[in-house]
Image (spheres, rainbow, N blue to C red):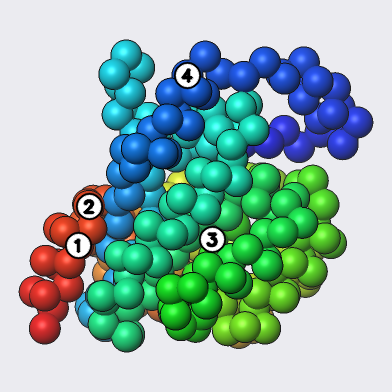
Amino acid sequence: MTIPTQSIDRRARQDRRNLEPHPITEDLADALIANEIELLFQPQWRADGSLSGAEVLVRWEHPDDGSLAGDALVAIAQSGGIARRLSRHIARGAFKAALDWPEDLHLSLNVTAMDLLDRTFAEGLTEMIADYDFPPERLTLEITEQALVADLDRSAARLDTLAQLGIRIALDDFGAGFCNFRYLKVLPLHALKLDRAMIEGIAGDSRDLAVLRGIIAMARALEIDVLAEGVETEAQRDVVIDEGCAYWQGYLGGKPVNAEVFAALISQQD
């Protein structure tokens, strides 16, 4: 999801101009009730080659607009005031699926700006974890820079509450945006998730490789893990592992798949 990085006043003016719900918001609300929103799981791997878990993604097949996913779904939900319903629907489905995974596999959930602005976010997530008896130390929340623009200090406080429960916090898409290094000081981070743009050229461009090494060195000094996203070739995988990334994901390791296919992948690891 993208939130402009202009001042809060300018964002407020833009928000007032965009109060009209998306034309298919009601369809999305009906799809949530009918459980027609499909959850997908993209494998994440450890440097030693073992499966570490999966990131949860979402897809909806609209009869007229076709396949809608990720930011598009969030924007539609926000326009109609059902963003919280969408987020909780995703979380519940993800917890239900991950309960059957081995205890060493982690579940990664994306957190939106609307989640962090919701005063009940931390409390609601904690209640869901308790309802499903899901170990909080097996959960990672992935937050993009855009989701932190509105109120960094308040977001940090809410994330700190969750981190104290054992939940891991990862800064997603690192390197794709403004890269405000204050995030590294304020947030209770356990991992940096490198954007695919930071990975594309590392196997053949010395400058790209130098940037990667700099980020990993900084993360190591802060005692933060690094996960490389968008790994599509064996050469890229080898570089990120050799340079010290603890985790990686991308099409080389598997595209997003439904819960049943991911369960089959787990069984193949035994």
Counting from the top left corner in percent of width and height, residue 110 is at 51, 55
Residue type at mark 3? Glu
For the residues bearing labels 3 and 4, Cβ distance under 8 angstroms:
no
Q: Is residue 114 visible?
A: yes
Residue type at mark 1? Phe
Up-down relation of residue 131 to residue 119 (above or below): below
**148 lies left or right of 85:** right
Q: Is residue 233 visible?
A: no
Q: Residues within 10 Å of mark 1 (few under 14, many from 20)?
A: many
| Secondary structure state at the residue bearing disc 1 | helix
For the residues bearing labels 2 and 4, Cβ distance under 8 angstroms:
no
The answer to which quarter of the image holds residue 181 is bottom right
The label shown at residue 24 is: 4
Counting from the top left corner in percent of width and height, residue 87 is at 53, 49
| Secondary structure state at the residue bearing disc 2 | loop
The label shown at residue 258 is: 2
The label shown at residue 204 is: none
- The residue that mark 3 highlights is 142
Distance, label 2 to label 3, CA atoms, is 20 Å
- The residue that mark 1 highlights is 262
Please report whichever mark, 2 or 3, sits nearer to the chain's N-terminal start: 3
